[in-house]
Image (cartoon, rainbow, N blue to C red):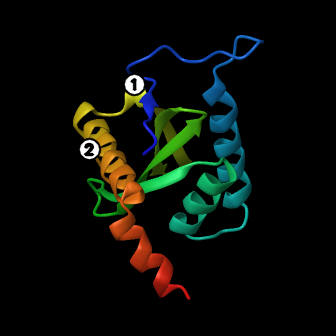
Amino acid sequence: MRNVVYLSDHPERELENGESAFALARLELEMALELGETDQRCWDDLVLDATRAAGGELLFMLPDPDGNGEIRQRAMILLREDDHACLIFVCQCDTGYTILDEHQIEPDLAEFAHATVNVLQHLRADDRVLRPLAEGLH
């Protein structure tokens, strides 16, 4: 099983120019979101495609009702770099989207996301789960 070290627990890895390793992944995510918005695709497809383009993993999406009865979407994304990972929270808004870094995410929600990652890691490491899935594909 692969252990993931979260940036909230450790200092960010820096590149030679002083940028965080996750700055590039976040930039890729933002660019993919911007490009996807021009296609007028649904929010779910837009976020999923942008996450994949940035090499991330879409953990979950949540509805977010506003005071006017409209329901917007929020998505929790996991970006990885080697054995490090960070959470990014993308929120749908009137102007498109807002991105929150891990330290800006509500603590309870970030804790839930970390628990989700731990469960997924255990499932991926358990051959009793993977074998039937692989056999079902053939």
Which mark, by number, is residue 112? 2
Marked residue nearer the N-terminal end (2 or 1)? 1
Q: Quadrant of the C terminus?
A: bottom right
67 relative to 1 in the view: left or right: left
- Above or below, comparing residue 72 to residue 3 in the picture: below
Residue at horizontal 50 percent and vertical 34 percent from the top = 85
Across and down, in percent, residue 72 comes to 39, 59
Among the 4 quarters of the image, the one containing residue 31: top right
Question: Does residue 73 appear in this view?
Answer: no
Question: Does residue 48 appear in this view?
Answer: yes
Which mark, by number, is residue 117? none
| Residue at the right extreme of this rendering | 17
Task: Assign a secondary structure to mark 2.
Answer: helix
Camera-side residue of 19 and 31 = 19
Residue at horizontal 60 percent and vertical 33 percent from the top = 82
Determine the CA span between mark 2 and mark 1: 14 Å
Residue type at the position of mark 1: His
Residue type at the position of mark 2: Phe
Judging by the rendered image, the residue that carries numbered circle 1 is: 103
The reply to whether discs 2 and 1 touch (Cβ–Cβ < 8 Å) is no
| Residue at the left extreme of this rendering | 108
Number of on-image labels = 2
Residue at horizontal 70 percent and vertical 11 percent from the top = 18
Q: Quadrant of the N terminus?
A: top left
Q: Nearer the viewer, mark 2 or mark 1?
A: 2
How crowded pointer 1 is (Cα within 10 Å; few <14, some 14-19, many 20+) is rated as few
